[in-house]
Amino acid sequence: MKDENIKKVLLLGSGALKIGEAGEFDYSGSQALKALREEGVETILINPNIATVQTSEGVADRIYFLPVQPYFVERVIEKERPDGILLSFGGQTALNCGVALYQSGVLEKYNVKVLGTPVQAIMDTEDRELFVEKLNEIDVKTIKSEACETIEQTRKAAAELGYPVIIRAAYALGGLGSGFCDNEEELDKLAEKAFSFSPQVLVEKSLKGWKEIEYEVVRDRYDNCITVCNMENFDPLGIHTGESIVIAPSQTLTNSEYHKLRALAIKIIRHIGIVGECNVQYAFDPKSEDYRVIEVNARLSRSSALASKATGYPLAFVAAKLGMGYGLFELKNSVTKTTSAFFEPALDYVVCKIPRWDLSKFRGVDRELGSSMKSVGEVMAIGRNFEEAIQKGLRMIGQGMHGFVENKELEIDDIDTALREPTDKRIFIISKAMHKDYTIDQIHELTKIDKWFLQKLKHIIDIDEALKKCTSVNVLDKELLRTAKIYGFTDFQIARAVGLEQELGNMSKAGLVVRQLRKGYGILPVVKQIDTLAAEYPAQTNYLYVTYDGVASDISFGDNKRSVIVLGSGAYRIGSSVEFDWCGVQALNTIRKQGYRSIMINYNPETVSTDYDMCDRLYFDELTFERVMDIIEMESPYGVVISTGGQIPNNLAMRLDAQNVPILGTSAKDIDNAEDRAKFSSMLSRNGIDQPEWSALTSMDDINNFIDRVGFPVLVRPSYVLSGAAMNVCSNREELERFLKLAANVSEDHPVVVSQFIEHAKEVEMDAVAKDGEIIAYAISEHIEFAGVHSGDATIQFPPQKLYCETIRRIKRVSKMIAQELHISGPFNIQFLARENDIKVIECNLRASRSFPFVSKVLKINLIELATKVMLGLPVEKPGKNLFDLDYVGIKASQFSFSRLQKADPVLGVDMASTGEVGCLGDDTNTALLKSMLSVGHRIPEKNILLSTGGAKQKAAMLDAARCLVENGYNLYATGGTSKFLAENGIENTQVYWPSDEGKQPQALDMLHNHEIDMVVNIPKNLTASELDNGYKIRRAAIDLNVPLITNSRLASSFIHAFCKVKLEDIDIKSWEEYK
Amino acid sequence: MRKVTLVLEDGTKFHGKSFGYDRPVAGEVVFNTAMMGYPESLTDPSYAGQLMTLTYPLVGNYGVPPFTVGADGLATFMESDRIYASAIIVADYSEQYSHWNGVETLAEWLKREHVPGITGIDTRELTKVLREHGVMMGKIIFDDEPDNIPEADYEGVNFVDKVSCKEIIRYNEGAGKKVVLVDCGVKNNIIRCLVNRGVEVIRVPWNYDYTSMNFDGLFLANGPGDPDMCEDAVNIVRRQMSMSAKPICGICMGNQLLAKAGGAQIYKLKYGHRSHNQPVRMVGTNSCYVTSQNHGYAVDAKTLGADWEELFVNMNDGSNEGIRHKVNPWFSSQFHPEACSGPVDTEFMFDKFVETLK
């Protein structure tokens, strides 16, 4: 039964999205808060991630946009005095924070009860030694390392464990001196090498090629246990599960294997004493029933979010209820509403999760996949067969792929190596290898991927080959066409395979021809429900997917034009993440409130918008033109919202419009007028609106002529990129030539867009909603960094604190003109450059932007709700409040995940690199900035600061801040030029040497390694691609050694001033509603 | 693969392809929502006379294990000596398999045992039809040959008699306590679970009168079809209960026979329980178990005699999942504690039974 003493509960969120800790915790937290509110419990949430759904009005009773760190959490506990605390819904961040509060006695001091899994159980799973000991107690096998100090010992250990073994040097960074040994001879060689790095060598049994299997397990306080889902990795052990394609349920396990691991999972969860949810990861021998437990996560995780979406079983919701004291038998199945929550879902479909990487955004990053996670998002595809699911998934990851086959030819020199050493492209290399007649056995040998998966992939190849044999669409056999559709081929893939694309010279036309043909044959998709019980019980579920592998739909479609479809934002990626999920959810809420049926199409398992409670119908499916059209044709909605999901839906505007789809809000034509650079530019010129000069150029001469006119630096955007970043700033002719040579072919077919790059200009954002071309509400915000840092990486203050009134007036005037010209009805965003009072337009998007949740929450006006009403054609009033009425400041700061991205240069540029953000409020700029900087992992330094402040201008800009540091008792260490400059200006400092100044002391790197530096300010001299130079080494060392790093002088100055002026104790602890 | 049509009693048709033995067949069409375990299910004698539909679409992935026989005389990886289901109906048969213990494809096995298998069927839609209408008779016919297969019967047929052993078989002879196992269509794992607990198992035909034999406990096994066809077995149980208070345990059909012997009535469920995820609760406790089930009939708990009470109930539909005698060590479960296939959470039922023998 429910614990009646718990009336007020504090939930810890996970903070900014980062690699390994992303949107899944917004989903878990939102579900937990919903479960608590249903119980009449008062909820308090701490989460600085302002773009999340959980930090929206009505989700928690009080929200604190504060760092999820012991100090701040204690202050909130002191103020709020909650009865209970939930630690397992905010990822590792919340868990670590909770454990620290427990260990320091804070929870006991304030008499706060930890709900759900006890802290001791958490610690038992987190501490490797305790964990192994704990599982030994019940004879469950774990992966053991034997620590050895002599070669003799390593031999003995290896013999006991059985070859093959892995050996690694203890305490060595980056896997130095580690490797696999198949026999004693190899061991001797490697061990000798390893001992040269370290006095201690660890020997482990090698589980290379073993399967990786996970179970999601739930336990209540009455010791009742269920496993909600099991999942099998497509990639064998060795690739982090976050980097692996994952299939649910497992496909290659027999009954005995499945239930052996299931029973072990339950045994483990009972022994550890979990109350709520946890996941158990296994390594499983592909040649016997041998296993090892890899780890247990005593909290909701990425896998649990995936399992919830894969099965329809709301793990976080149930875990929160169990934390409140309920037994599983007291809860109902949320899907059927009639059957018990104590059951294990039966799936009648297959689910495929595929990670989304953005490695090309990072300079120098290691592309090989391994034991650390690098992916920034994921997709989940649902099908009635594996081929359908994986082809859907490969389209969903949004990297220009059409499925497993019929993609642009991949250039690979050495297929064997590419198969053996997996990168983000591996699945497509398998496709290439199969087309090149590699056998399944060969590919299995090289990849260790289970042959079953390879057999299924080969089946796709076989269908593709059959299609290719059709010389024309006219001779395409109806049965073959149906088979291709059943196994996940799009109209376009089929069109390309039969040569139709080449014949018509147009992708979308070719796809439409196949579409017409198959519709004529009656080959149409059906809609199936995810009902948790494989149709055994009737379920009124609205959780749907589309498939060709079926004869009837589970639902019926009314034709009453009372539904509105919202297109979601797809996989999280750099530049498009939780903020668009928030926008989508707000649109759904508004549509429902206005009496329409809301329909969501999205496929990202980490989101709240794909929670089937959020809308009337959820299509967990593709956002391709084909699939969106399929759904529109079945649903015949009143309208479709394409402006709240970022660029993916926005890009569909013209094609949907051509099919007469009722797009709500700004018309497709006007969207195109903003998206098409030339059209937009001429519109600006027509209206006398200034913009940085640009030109699309097709020869080197033209480029040189253009630069002669506008001067360096210039921003260069090739339309066809061979490798590396898509966009770059070039400061001189040499750099320009090098970049163009490296990155692009300049030709008639592939023009390069070159724009004037304006330095030392402020960047200003206008987020607004207009109705019939008239602005209804707006928010102007200001970047702290000068232009040159991508708006997604910049630190943004709202309301603007340092803009001239005249600048603001001009921005408003220009925005008004643009809104009128483009007949905007709905959300839009314009980016401006401002120097003195000159303003130039750099970009305009006729859709919600990344900053909509931030400005909406700071302003306390929900711009998406307003925009949705406008799009529905409802009357709206201009809000009475404007941004100058605010007595507080909001600061949005970016979260970087460089520590996960080995070798990547942690420097900011014109391409976005941040993986998440936070937004904090404060009574003034300094406190707001401190809160947000601390939230993204910066720390107030103790005493020693290392400065390398770049070029002359940046050095000058940093002077004040340096003086401020010295006045506040900090010790400055500076590299050559900076040291000299500081000394000349009377600022005391100690010179340190660059790595290239070999032999000179003290060395900057040594100081970092000795943990003598508390903060690094390292500003690159210019924005060009730097080589592996001194600056890179220092920046990378700071990241690898977990020392806070700032690479921008304006941000560094602001942060330094903030922590020099405001002490930690003086930071106000106020909830969102207390800022009035 | 030849084209086939599954025709249900109500005229509903599903089109697919034959991947098993090419032979038309008729039987009761049932669905099973388990996601794995096709070798175990196919060899479960309780599926006799039935066309088994699997709702999980991908089938055949790990092939078929070898038909080896262990020291105990039982098939190592199978639940009996052959396939008992009349046919298997799936959505997406996997023509190739991958598993270290696989020796042939599912198709090869079906062909060898002359059992039809069809694929390409929308098994979710089929399940919905069965769910709405209740289980139905149906037949698989080949599109390229005339439909001349006779209609099959399910109700009124004594399937237990067809699948039960004909002679007494002993396992683990001389091990200690003796258990008479009434074979209504017993799964091997019931025998294994008993043998592994150190008892001698005397497997007798379903209608064998064991009352005068020397034994310590009685075990009523699972089996196919309608328990009302097994009056002989019920009468023998009744006689046994009137003669002594020796422990009795039952599983599935065994639960129904024990209930009948105790005076209760049996009814046919609309579409049965065939899955690995049936939640049951032990009456009067907060203990719940995920169970493996395969039954079309159930005990009407309201008709239990005054000396009897419910031991388990189904948490989804409230149907009976087990009974026990208020005084004597007589108890049974409707679900399958021996699993195979399915979750193994309730294997303690065997421990409890073996404890009562002492």
Image (cartoon, coloured by chain):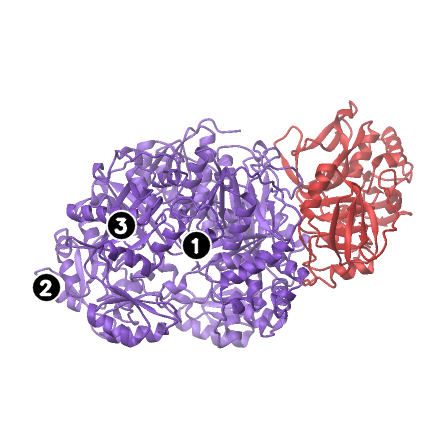
Chain colours: A purple, B red
The residue located at (75%, 44%) in the rendering is: B12
Q: Nearer the viewer, residue B228 or A203?
A: B228
Q: What is the chain letter for disc 1?
A: A
**Residues packed near mark 2 inside 10 Å, few (<14), some (14 to 19) or many (20 plus):** some
Residue A637 visible at all: yes
**Of tags 2 and 1, which is closer to the observer?**
1
| Residue found farthest to the front | A686
Q: CA distance from mark 3 to mark 2?
A: 38 Å
- Taking depth in this image into account, of A779 and B313 the one nearest to the observer is A779
Where residue A390 appears, as percent x and y from the top left, is: 56, 58
Q: Which-is-in-front pick, marks 3 and 1? A: 1
Q: Earlier in the sequence, mark 3 or mark 1?
A: 1
Residue A379: x, y in percent? 49, 54
N-terminal label among 3 and 2: 3
Instruction: Tell me the amino acid under the disc marked 2.
Output: Ala
Left/right placement of residue A774 relative to residue A949 reads: right
Q: Looking at the image, is A115 positioned above or below residue A1037?
A: above
Q: Which residue is mark 2?
A: A983
Instruction: Provide the residue designation for mark 3.
Output: A765
Q: Which residue is mark 1?
A: A654
Q: In whole angstroms, how far apart are the C-alphas of marks 2 and 1?
A: 60 Å
Q: Amino acid at mark 1?
A: Met
Rendered-image quadrant of the N terminus of chain B: bottom right
* Pointer 3 and pointer 1 on the same chain: yes
Q: Quadrant of the C terminus of chain B?
A: top right
Check if mark 3 and mark 2 are on a common chain.
yes
Q: Earlier in the sequence, mark 2 or mark 1?
A: 1
Q: Identity of the amino acid at label 3? A: Glu
Which structural element holds mark 1? helix
A34 or B138, which is in the foreground? Answer: B138
